[in-house]
Each structure stands twice: as C-alpha cells, then as structure tokens.
Amino acid sequence: MSGHGPSLRRRLLLPLAWSWLVGLALSTIGAYLLARSSANSAFDRSLQDEASALAAKVTWSDRGPLLDVSRQVLELLSWDKADRNAFVMLDPEGRALAGDSAVPLPPAAERQRSFARPVLFDADYQGEPVRGVVFSVASPMIDRTVSVVIVETRHKRTSLERDLQIGIVLPALGLGIVTFLMLTFSVRRGLRPLRDVGHEVALRAVHDWRPLALDKVPAEAVPLIERINRLLLDVQHSVTLQRRFVADAAHQLRTPVAGIRVLAQELERELAAESAAGPWRPLLGELGRASERLTRLIGQLLSLARSETALTMNAEHQPQDIVPLLREATEQIVLQGLREGRQIELDAPTAPVVARAHPIWLGEVVNNLLDNARRYGGEHILLRVRPAAGGGAEVVVEDDGPGVAPEHMVRLFEPFWRGERADLRNDGGTGLGLTIAREIVERLGGSLRARSRPDYPGMQFTVSLAA
C-alpha cells in the first residue's frame, strides 16, 4: 500500500543491521591488521634470533672472518618445507664471504644501523617477496666487520595470517548472525501483541465498538490503544445520537403526515359529492400518492434507526429453519406482485435450511429486496433459499430487469440513491430499502452481495447467513 511509512519492525531492525554490518567490517579490518601484525611479529623475532645466533658463530683469524658452523647446521638453516630460506655473510664492501651470493642485500644505511641490533627489511629473492634481517658484528681485536643477512619467503606468514583472520572473523560473523537473528525474533515477539490487536480489529463486525483489550499490549503502545478506545466510544456515542435523532424526527413526523393523508381523503370525498369530475381530481391523486410515499419513507427511517438496537440487544439471534420465516414474511408482497402481473417464485428445499437469523428482521431484509425487484426489475422474480457449503444459508433474490450499470454499482447501497434521474420516476421508492437490508444482514453476522449486467443477466442479490 502507498501512503504509509516503513513498518515498526523495519525501523527497529534497520539501524541494528547497519550497526552489525559496520561492526563486521571494522572487526574484519581489525582482524586482518591484528593477524598481520601478530604473524609478522612472531616470524620477525624468530628471524632476528637466527641472525643473532649465526652472527655469534663468526670467528676472527689472520685469514679473516670465518663462520664456525658445521655443514649440517647450514643445511638445516636453509631447509624448510613451506618457505625458502637463504643466508649470506658479507664484508664491508658487500662481497659474499659465505652463503648464497644471490641473497638480496639491504641498503647500506640499514647495514650501518644493524651493529646495535638486527634490522629487518623487505626485498625480492628469486622472483618471490621475502622478509630479511641483517646483523653486523665487529672484531674485538682487529678493525674488521661483517654482516650476516638471512632472508625467508612469506608463505608461512601468509598462512598464519589467514588462519588468524579466519579464527577471528568467522566466530565474530557467526556470533553476529546469531545475535541478529535473536534480535529479529525478539522484535517480532515484542510486536506480536500489536499484530494481535490489528487481527482482532480486522475480524470485528462493522458496528462492533467494544474497547480493545490492554492486558497483553506493550506499555509503549498502551496510550495509543487507550486513545483508540476513546475514539471508539466517541464514534459509538455520535452514531447513537444520530440514530436517536433520526428515530425521534421520523416518529414526530408520523402524526402530521397521517393527518395530511386523512385530510386529503376527506377533501376528495367532499369534492366527489359535489362533482363527479373536475380539475382537482388529478391534484388530489398526486397529493395522496405523495403522502403515501412520505409515510413509507418515515417507516423506512424508523426501521433503519431501530435496527441497530434491536439486532444488538435482541436474544433471538439463534440458529433456526429460515424457510417458514421467509414464506410468512413474503406472502403479502408476493400477492401484491401477482396483482401487478409480476411472477414471483419461491424456490426452497423441503428439508430445513438452518441459519442464525432474527424472525422479524430477516423478513424485513427479504421484503426490501423483493420490493426493489418489483419496482425496478423485470416480469420474473425468483427467491431462492439454499444451505451454504460451509454451514449457514444463502438467500438469493433474482430478476430479469435492466439491472444497474457497472459504474453505479458502488453507489447501490448508499442511502436515498435510486439511480440516474430518480427525480423523474414516480415509482414510490425511498432509496433506503437496500441500505436497511445490508445494515440488518451485517448485524446478523452475514453479508449482502449484488451482481448485475454484464456478470448476471438482470439483478441478483445474495444474502449469506452464518450457521
């Protein structure tokens, strides 16, 4: 639906999701830097220790500096399954005295600083990046110096970095996912009472204005529900006043309208005694028909106003066989239709058709539907009663008249609407019959649907009643 903001769950979870993603990104970066620093620190210390140990094996003689280590030690120093190691011992001019002369050399400045402690550097060896260390020592007796350089490829470092990163990131990712799922579940569970309230409102009948329960509503939503309850009470009070006004006004109008009818009849008799024909006769006939229509309108208004209280408070809403009720309630209007040349047929099964209904108001519904068909429908009218598939009953009123145009179907149940140019028709209708019928059916817990051309060849009203 358009026109509404994001859901409350989205408002709550979206900031948490962004916080989680930002935290995951920061933890990944931190894990990468930490793993890289830890791996380099461990391997660098090992490399520096090797350089210090190798430099400690330098001996000084008349022939120059010598490396006093066995061949096996040198092979062990340069042998590794994962990494390629190499070393070289240099004189101050950079000439190799022992080891591999292809070992990359650090800058001269680095060698100058390496007399105090081993100095680390990065370089390339045989096409691979390596980590190196240089450690320079001087002879205590003669003015001679040498530098020991050891280089090592980075395979084990990279593997250790990756293992550390996986060891840090994967638990953080798993913990983050579990935490986010728990937050999602908690938010959904916290919002469940609001969804239950919405579901309760959706299942309520149109005129059910009972206050909403507050016992399971979160404390933050209590003011909202309380305001809705006050609004329901205000609406109920307003509608009650409106209906009371309509009932009182209609009741007060009955007496003067009845007086007008009586006076019109008396005037017609007196004038008829003086003259059998005259220009006054059509006027008196029109006056009688207008007063009759006004009487019918007042009666319909009273029915509309009284239906709410009667159907809400009356205890006669109970499952019962509705076929006898319909036969009795529609007898008079069926006879009236036959006198007018209309064929009104009742199609009902011999077995009982049980539904929840009110004996008087259900008859009012069907009478209004039949009266609507008699006034606006065709020559053939059918009243059909059938048990519903899921329990209850369906009462259908059909006619073969012109029906209602599709663009006017939405206004069919509006009060006082009688179609296009209703002011030019003298059919005696009030425009309240269908409104009253739908009001009563909904208060009985049922529904009233209408179909017309082109879906149905004429007009069809279907009343669905609950079991």
Image (cartoon, grey):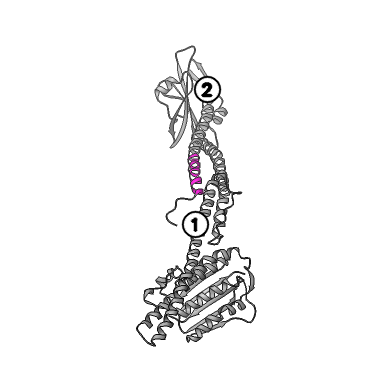
**Residue 141, image x and y in percent?**
49, 11
Which is nearer the eye, 94 or 310?
Answer: 310
Q: Residue at x 56, y 68 (%)?
A: 446
Instruction: Determine which residue is flagged by label 2.
Output: 52
Check disc 2: other Cα within 10 Å, few if <14, some if 14-19, many if 20+. some
In the displayed structure, does residue 425 sit left or right of residue 370? Answer: left
Dot 2 amino acid type: Ser
Q: Which quadrant, please, contains the N terminus? A: bottom left
**Residue 95, image x and y in percent?**
42, 24
Q: Residue at x 50, y 20 (%)?
A: 66
Instruction: Determine which residue is flagged by label 1.
Output: 238
Which is nearer the eye, 142 or 302?
Answer: 302
**Foreground disc of the pair 2, 1:** 1
In the displayed structure, does residue 242 sit left or right of residue 466? Answer: left
Q: Is residue 326 above or below residue 160?
A: below
Dot 1 amino acid type: Ser
Check disc 1: other Cα within 10 Å, few if <14, some if 14-19, many if 20+. few
Q: Is residue 294 magenta?
A: no
- The stretch of residues the image draws in magenta is 8-24
Which is nearer the eye, 305 or 417?
Answer: 305
Q: Residue furthest front?
A: 274
Q: Residue at x 44, y 75 (%)?
A: 291
Q: Which quadrant, please, contains the C terminus? A: bottom right
Q: Is residue 18 magenta?
A: yes
**Residue 229, image x and y in percent?**
54, 52
Please say whether residue 98 is visible from this viewpoint: no
**Residue 349, image x and y in percent?**
61, 81
